[in-house]
C-alpha cells in the first residue's frame, strides 16, 4: 500500500490538536487516501456538500451533522450546500409536511453552525461560484461535479456528502483520481447522428452514453453545445453511468483522448427509443423543470412560453435562491408566476417529498430527473421537451 505523507498541520488535525471534528474528518480522509493509494493531500479552494434533504439523510444524518457541529466543526474553505428537501420560504404555502420542514430546518441549522453557506443548489456555477481550470475542489453532487470537471476544467472526484464535509472542515482532500492529470483521459469517442435541438435531446444523449461509458471518460466530436446544453448532457451521464468528466471537441477546456479509445455513434433511432421508454403515462399531476437548477436564460425561455399559453397544472421551476433573487429583480419571476408557473427555490423535484405531497405522475424534460423520480419519489413519468410536457 502507498505511503500517505501528511503535513505537520494535517498531522495536528489527525491527532486531535485542532478539535474533535477536524480529527474525525481527517481520520476519514486518511482512510480514503489509503484506499485509493494517494501519496498526499491536496489543498482545495471550495467544497460543495450533498446530503442536505431530510428525505435523503433522515434522522441518522441529522444526528451526525449535529454531532460534528457540537464538536466545534468549522469550515476551513468556502463551502456550500446542495438542494434541501423544501423551499425554505414557501414550504407551508406549497403543502410540504410540517414534520419534514421541522427536521429540514434542523439540518440547515447544523450546517450553518459549521459555517457552510445555505446556497442549496446543484448549480453553484449559476450564482458565481466558478472554480478555474486546474483548481482543486471537493464537490459532491454528481451533475455539479460533472460541470466543474468538464465545462470549467476544475479538478474534483465525485465526493460523497460526508467526504465533502470532511474536506470542507480540513481544507484538504486526498490527491487521487481526477485530481491527477494522467487520469483525465477519454477512452470512449462519441459521434452523434441524432438531432440535438434542446436540453431534452442532450439529456437523452447523456442517458445513452452514460450507459455505454462503463467507467470510461467519453469525448464527443462535433456537437454544438453551450453551457446550458452541457449541463443537461453531463447531468444525464452522471445519472445513468456515474460519469464525472467528459470532453466536447472545441467546447470544453480539456481534450485528452487515448489512442486506443473505443468509438460509438449515437443515432436518432436510439434517442427516439430512449424517449419512448421514459414515458409511462399520457398525463401528469405535476410538471417540473430545473434539473439541474435553472439558469436565467432558461427562465427567459419559460417566461416567453407561458406568455403564449399559461400552465394549466401545477408547474414547478426549480432553481437556486440566488438565481430567483435576480429573476425577481428582472421581472422574470412575475412573468412566470402570473402565468401558472411557480419558482421553487432551495430544493428540487427529486429531493422534495413529492410522494408524500400527493403527486403520482410527474412530467419532466431532464434525463437526470427522469432517472431518479421513479425510484426516489415513486413517480410515473411523462417525458419530453418543455413545449410537449407543458401543454399536453
Ligand atoms: Fe439538481 Fe435535484 Fe437534479 S439536485 S441535478 S435538480 S436531481
Image (cartoon, rainbow, N blue to C red):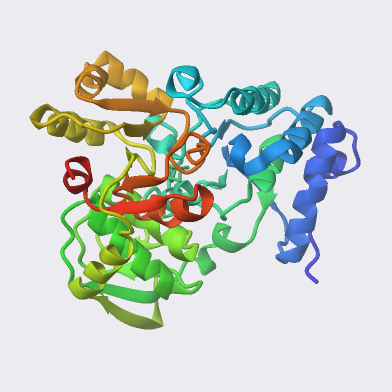
Q: Give above or below for 71 relative to 374.
A: above
Q: Quadrant of residue 338?
A: top left
Q: Is residue 210 left or right of residue 281?
A: right
Q: Nearer the viewer, residue 115 or 134?
A: 115
Q: Give the quadrant of ligand 1.
A: top left
Q: Is residue 309 left or right of residue 50?
A: left
Q: Nearer the viewer, residue 365 or 78?
A: 365
Rendered residue at 63%/32% (across/down): 77
Residue 171 shows up from this direction: no
Q: Give above or below for 358 relative to 221.
A: above
Q: Which quadrant would the C terminus be assigned to in this image?
A: top left
Q: Is residue 262 left or right of residue 267?
A: right
Rendered residue at 63%/61% (across/down): 176
Q: Quadrant of residue 252?
A: bottom left
Rendered residue at 59%/22% (across/down): 98
Q: Give how far across and how far down residue 140 sits, in percent.
A: 56, 47
- Residue situated furthest left in the rendering: 308
Amino acid at each position: 500500500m502507498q505511503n500517505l505523507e501528511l503535513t505537520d498541520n494535517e498531522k495536528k488535525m489527525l491527532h486531535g490538536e485542532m478539535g474533535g471534528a477536524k480529527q474525525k474528518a481527517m481520520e476519514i480522509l486518511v482512510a480514503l487516501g489509503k484506499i485509493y493509494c494517494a501519496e498526499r493531500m491536496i489543498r482545495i479552494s471550495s467544497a460543495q456538500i450533498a446530503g442536505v434533504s431530510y428525505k435523503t439523510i433522515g434522522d441518522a444524518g441529522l444526528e451526525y451533522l449535529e454531532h460534528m457541529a457540537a464538536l466545534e466543526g468549522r469550515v476551513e474553505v468556502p463551502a456550500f450546500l446542495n438542494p434541501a428537501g423544501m423551499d425554505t420560504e414557501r414550504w407551508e404555502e406549497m403543502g410540504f409536511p410540517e414534520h419534514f420542514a421541522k427536521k429540514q430546518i434542523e439540518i440547515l441549522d447544523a450546517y450553518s453552525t459549521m459555517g457552510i453557506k445555505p446556497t442549496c443548489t446543484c448549480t453553484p456555477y449559476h450564482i458565481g461560484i466558478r472554480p478555474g481550470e486546474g483548481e482543486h475542489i471537493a464537490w459532491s453532487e454528481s451533475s455539479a461535479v460533472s460541470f466543474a470537471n468538464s465545462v470549467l476544467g476544475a479538478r474534483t472526484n465525485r465526493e460523497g456528502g460526508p467526504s465533502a464535509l470532511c474536506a470542507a472542515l480540513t481544507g484538504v482532500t486526498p490527491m487521487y483520481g481526477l485530481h491527477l492529470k494522467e487520469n483525465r483521459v477519454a477512452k470512449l469517442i462519441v459521434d452523434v447522428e441524432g438531432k440535438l435541438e434542446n436540453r431534452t435531446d442532450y439529456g437523452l444523449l447523456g442517458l445513452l452514453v452514460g450507459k455505454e461509458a462503463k467507467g470510461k471518460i467519453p469525448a464527443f466530436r462535433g456537437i454544438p453545445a453551450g453551457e446550458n446544453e452541457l449541463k443537461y448532457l453531463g447531468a444525464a451521464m452522471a445519472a445513468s453511468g456515474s460519469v464525472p468528466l467528459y470532453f466536447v471537441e472545441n467546447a470544453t477546456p480539456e481534450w485528452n483522448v487515448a489512442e486506443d479509445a473505443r468509438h460509438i455513434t449515437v443515432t436518432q433511432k436510439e434517442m427516439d427509443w430512449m424517449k419512448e421508454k421514459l414515458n409511462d403515462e399520457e398525463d401528469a399531476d405535476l410538471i417540473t423543470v430545473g434539473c439541474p437548477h435553472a439558469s436565467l436564460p432558461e427562465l427567459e425561455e419559460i417566461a416567453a412560453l407561458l406568455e403564449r399559453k399559461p400552465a394549466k397544472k401545477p408547474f414547478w421551476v426549480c432553481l437556486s435562491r440566488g438565481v430567483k433573487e435576480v429573476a425577481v429583480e428582472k421581472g422574470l419571476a412575475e412573468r412566470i408566476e402570473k402565468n401558472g408557473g411557480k419558482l421553487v427555490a432551495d430544493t428540487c423535484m427529486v429531493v422534495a417529498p413529492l410522494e408524500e405531497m400527493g403527486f403520482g405522475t410527474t412530467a419532466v424534460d431532464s434525463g437526470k430527473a427522469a432517472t431518479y423520480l421513479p425510484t426516489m419519489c415513486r413517480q410515473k413519468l411523462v417525458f419530453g421537451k418543455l413545449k410537449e410536457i407543458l401543454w399536453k
